Amino acid sequence: MMGLMRLSLAGPVLLYQSIVLALSQIWANKIRGILTTVGIMIGVAAVSAVIALITGMKQRVLSEFEAVGTNKIFISPHWPEKRANYSFYEVAFRLHDFDDLLENCPSVSKFTHIYSRGWGGQTLTFGSKVEDERINVMGVDPEWHDIEHRLVQMGRPLTVMDNDQLRPVCLINKTTRDKLGMDRDPTGQYIVWDGVRLLVIGMLEPSASAMMSDSESREVIVPFKYMIQKARWPWYSVMAMSKKPEASEDAKAEIEFYLRQKRHIRPGGEETFEVMTAQRMIEQFSRVANIVTMVATGIVGISLLVGGVGIMNIMLVSVSERTREIGLRKAVGARPAAILLQFLVEAVVLCLIGGAMGLLLGQGLTSAVSAMIPKEAGGGQQMIVPMSAIVLAFGFSAGVGLIFGMFPAIKAARLDPIDALRHE
Amino acid sequence: MLIRISNLTKHYTVGVERIRALDGVDIDIGLNEYVAIMGSSGSGKSTLMNILGCLDRPTTGTYELDGQLVSDMGAAQLARVRNERIGFVFQSFELLPRATAARNVELPMIYSRGAWFARRARAREALTTVGLADRMSHRPNQLSGGQKQRVAIARALVNRPAILLADEPTGNLDSVTSEEILALFDQLYTDGQTIIMVTHEPDVARHARRIIRMKDGKVQSDLAVEKDAVNA
């Protein structure tokens, strides 16, 4: 391939000519060209849609984490590997386990106990109205307002007094109020939760995060100490906040050390609790999202490969159809490199057209899919194929054109002009 | 001398058989000659034509074109020689069917250096020479056989080649049109163009001023044509 080495001398004029020629050649065989590029088109559409959707989801989820707070730390009881060796009371946190947490963990700014009964098997009653669906009753400390950024719209927040004196009071959200048909300002009214009368002291703001909370859930927030003394199975967890997001890992270490001491876990002994930082969760999520992107891109790469074989096939047909033309071009002075360039450019242009159409299709796919995702799951907003995916798609297309166009182009470049001109 | 061929041989191997298509050929052709190469099929005239046109390389011997030793050149160098020094006219015209006459004539200039901006003007000039200035934007299927061959001749002339190499240029044309094309060749010759033409028709060959007859890979005869024979 001495011709290949001289490609650099071919010059921009020849390149321009080759592009013009390739476009006219493709235009002359429009249907064939479109059918040939379907493989590339679908491949590129799939890659770009997958990347767009995952990128969109990732941004959405990360912004959720931002809204929730990146300096949160979740502490929960955790059954070790050998479950049978531990009783419920060995694993579950005891009521006073966290009493001197703040003194021992300088990186933790505040924390709240959280006790939740879960969703089912409970009823809320107001007058004659009974609600038994999607009920979310939580016992929390007054610090919960600060940590979750949930203040009250009406009435007053929970206080230390409510908690310490085990007052049967509660905060409700707008959904609870509306579903129970309460007054616009529900403060001062009583609701009944599983036979317990609770005084409504205020109404909560909606959560800033759409994904981490369910606007349809009937929230009832009760003082933790009141709720835990009524619980048959006092299984609770703790949400803490580090002084700043960067201190989360320090705080986690401090809490782990504190809890091991508190629970008398010997060095090397298995932990009966789990401490998870929001930072760590973000990292884990990002990692999963990246892996999904890579795997999807890899799978889609196979369809590009199939598309490439289609391109090679049609280019071989093109070379054989135009053998006489190649012979003529060589006779009037086209060097092998010029013929090579011509067919290579044609393959690449064909692939790039397929890639461009694939990107349009991918954007359509992305819009369609993001419209189908419910708002709570992070859908609804406009998702756009990111620049990186566009560059990737065109890069892939051009690459496929180069690789799969090379063999037919070399074949064309090596044709003997005498034989080519004699070809029928 | 424009062309200096000495002791040229070309051997092919077909299966186990060795064919001597050219078997020691010596020919000199000067500037502004009009030469016809004749011979029956298998005489070696096509092989000689291919080598003269730098489409093929001899097995042994030397071919000097305008002082350049062509027989030693590689594929890319030969392409450049074809582009700059040789104009081909084929029996079946070999026009690009979707390109206009002007675009067809421009084709060799795509592969030349520096002719970029003058392309259209030079194509017009060449088409004017062959009497087709008014057919610039016609496609081959809108042209008659004779017009197609004129476009092909314009294409051969557009890079002002040292030799015009015509392979049975009237083979696909009726006798009236053939005479028109041959008259055009006569005109080009009179204007100073060197022409080498391969043909097996004596009527066509008679237009040339020198006839080389090939037989079994050798030059059988190399004779000047009587001047008045042109008008015969």
Image (spheres, rainbow, N blue to C red):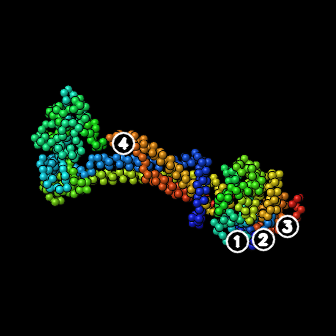
Q: Quadrant of residue B50?
A: bottom right
The amino acid beneath tag 2 is Asp
How many residues crowd around disc 2 within 10 Å: few (fewer than 14), some, or many (20 or more)? Answer: few
To which chain does the residue with label 1 belong?
A: B
Checking the image for residue A379, the label placed there is 4
Q: Are marks 2 and 3 on the same chain?
A: yes
Q: Which residue is mark 3?
A: B224
Is residue A33 visible in the rendered image? The answer is yes
Q: How many angstroms separate mark 3 from mark 4 (CA)?
A: 90 Å
The amino acid beneath tag 4 is Gly
Counting residues from the start of the chain, the first of labels 3 and 1 encountered is 1
Residues at marks 3 and 4 touching, judged by CB atoms closer than 8 Å = no
Q: Which residue is mark 2?
A: B28
Residues at marks 1 and 2 touching, judged by CB atoms closer than 8 Å = no
Is residue A420 visible in the rendered image? The answer is no
Q: Is residue A268 left or right of residue B199?
A: left
Q: In terms of depth relative to the viewer, which is nearer, B83 or A166?
A: A166
Secondary structure under tag 3 reads strand
Q: Which residue is mark 1?
A: B68
Residue at image point 21% right, 51% down: A241
Is label 1 or label 2 in front? 1
Secondary structure under tag 1 reads strand
Q: How many angstroms separate mark 1 from mark 2 (CA)?
A: 14 Å
Is label 4 or label 2 in front? 4
